[in-house]
Image: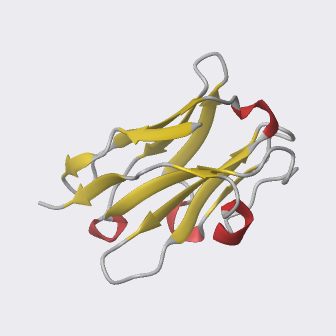
Amino acid sequence: VQLVESGGGLVQPGGSLRLSCAASGFTFDDHAIGWFRQAPGKEREGVSCISNRDGSTYYKDAVKGRFTVSTDNAKNTVYLQLNSLKPEDTAVYFCAADQPHFLFSCTLHERDYEEGYWGQGTQVTVSS
């Protein structure tokens, strides 16, 4: 069972990136998937989430209107589209899946994914 993030990189303010979270060893069908980020010296925070069980999506206020989460079940991949990036978006971004059938709607609370699966993270740096 594995989650692998990709798509991070260095981008100028106002730029865009698309992060991918690919699962192997299980399918996203019965899971909620959260995107989290951790900036240097700060605690990890929930950014966005999506549930394949009820279709719910949620976003941290600071990214609403700029980030979009989506799934491609055929590819067993979840995406996070990052637009209008700001320097304060700089962080390591992680995806996480909850335990099977644990959540119906997704949440941005890290504790709800603690017993599930986590990726290794991908670095996003926004700088001119």
Residue drawn at (68%, 60%), measured in percent from left and top?
113
**Is the residue 88 above or below the residue 42 in the image?**
above
**Is the residue 62 above or below the residue 83 in the image?**
below
Residue that sits furthest to the top in the current view: 74
**Position of residue 44 in the picture relative to residue 127 (left or right):** right
Residue 79 shows in this picture: no
**Position of residue 52 in the picture relative to residue 104 (left or right):** left
**Position of residue 92 in the picture relative to residue 111 (left or right):** left
Q: Quadrant location of the C terminus?
A: bottom left
Residue 6 shows in this picture: yes
Q: Position of residue 36 (x, y in %)?
A: 52, 61
Residue that sits furthest to the bottom in the current view: 41
Q: Position of residue 35 (x, y in %)?
A: 55, 54
Q: Quadrant location of the N terminus?
A: top right
Residue that sits furthest to the left in the current view: 128
Rendered image coloring scheme? secondary structure
Q: Quadrant of residue 31?
A: top right
Residue drawn at (48%, 48%), measured in percent from left and top?
119
Q: Across the whole image, how many numbered discs are drawn on residues?
A: 0
Residue drawn at (74%, 61%), measured in percent from left and top?
107
Q: Position of residue 29 (x, y in %)?
A: 77, 30
**Is the residue 126 above or below the residue 74 in the image?**
below
Residue drawn at (58%, 19%), measured in percent from left and top?
75
Q: Position of residue 101 (x, y in %)?
A: 87, 45
Q: Quadrant of residue 60?
A: bottom right
The one of 60 and 6 positioned closer to us in this rendering: 6
The one of 84 and 108 positioned closer to us in this rendering: 108
**Is the residue 66 above or below the residue 42 in the image?**
above
